[in-house]
Amino acid sequence: MKYALGNMLDGIGVTGLDPNAKSYIDAVVAAGATVTATQRNAINAFVKTEKAGSRWTMQKRLYLPIWGVAAPNAIDMVGLTSGSFVGGVTHTAGYVTSNGTSGHFLSDVSPGGAGCTLNGTGVHALYTAAALLSLTDSIRFFGAQTISALTRTATGGRGATTRFLTIGPNSNGFFTPFALGDQRGVQFLGRSSSIARFFLLRTSALLTDLQTDASVTLNSTVPMCWLANNNNGTVGSYVSSVARLGAAGMTDGMSQANAEAFTINLKTLWETCTGLTLP
Amino acid sequence: MIGFITTPDTSAAVTQAIRDAQTSRGLPVFWLLVGIPIYSGEYAGQSFIPADDDIITTPLRGNPIQTPQDFPEFASLIELLGGLDARIDLPVSNIIQEQP
């Protein structure tokens, strides 16, 4: 009702909306979110930009937990499936936070179940915080694996001299991109071939790291997890409550160039919808 | 960590009842409480269901806001777990969190 009223008040009809954008907006409104004209236009622009860049079909799950309520926050923008918030998660306008001991977000499916492939898996998360974010490598910003460590896809916090610990995608290969610094931004861990993987941190600037690593086995059973790690059904390594999750998702087949363009678009979407900014 | 101590079987039943409360209304399963195994301390071998006041007042749906307490099943699940006064404060060290 508030969505329809908003459309009448600002004099803009829904005919210009991309059908996928409209379906997502309708779904979050039905789940109890209030979508402003600015947010509606930002979602529409995001989807159209992804389609214009031939990246929309690469999106396998995309969650935008900015609505302050669990049900709309859990909706996948791409297929309108729903993930699940588990335990102590606080829903705030613009982001969600874990209580650091039980709160996490699970996709409805594993990377393989979502349509990610062995040599094309990408997983991302937009994290922000009230101040510089520097969590240790005992936590995972996102991650999942089966009983085999060779299926890992995860990103964790800092080491002694490095900003992140990343594992995979779809291997047990570790790498530690970037010197110590702020972890806020769009974190994107992707695999662009059987022997190449990359990690991006998108803020107002862009940090990239490309590594050689052989893919081994795709996780097709254990759901991807954000705010923690899903180790074959046992969830742990929670981020602390200072880490604010504003977007999350899985992709397939994105090159590093694709991911660089997508993360710009995602940052714009989140900032426009929330009125908040990344560093 | 504020919550309930219970058996693994009861914990699984509570989780399933929360699932059912959503699917029986034609909703996807977008919110869950899941028991955490307790590995050390007085309650080792049992399950811990996190249920502090923030959790049981989580906004689940909007316009108007509905929390777990607005679902009729909530009272019976809390009763099954011994009532809100049965909650304890469990040390985080009693559960394994860090993973390789």
Image (cartoon, coloured by chain):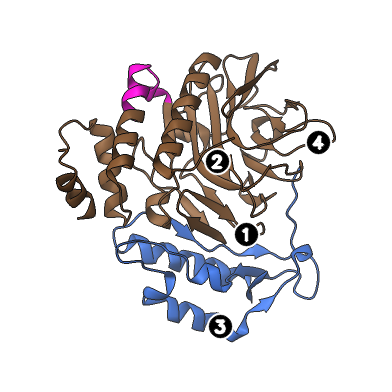
Chain colours: A brown, B blue
Tell me which amino acid carries mark 1: Asn
Pointer 3 chain: B
Residue A116 visible in the picture = no
Q: For the residue carrying disc 1, how many other residues have a C-alpha within 10 Å: few (<14), some (14-19), or many (20+)?
A: many
Q: Are marks 3 and 4 on the same chain?
A: no
In the displayed image of the protein, which residue is found farthest to the right? Answer: A160
Instruction: Please tell me which residue is depicted at 44% across the width and 43% down the height of the picture.
Output: A275
Pointer 4 chain: A
Q: Which residue is mark 2?
A: A224
Q: Which residue is mark 3?
A: B84
Secondary structure under badge 1?
loop
Percent position of residue A112, x then y: 50, 31
Name the one closer to the observer, A106 or A34.
A34
Name the one closer to the observer, A148 or A74.
A74
Instruction: Please tell me which residue is depicted at 22% across the width and 33% down the height of the picture.
Output: A17
Closer mark to the observer between disc 4 and disc 2: 4
Q: Earlier in the sequence, mark 2 or mark 1?
A: 1
Name the one closer to the observer, B19 or A42.
A42
Residue B24 visible in the picture = yes
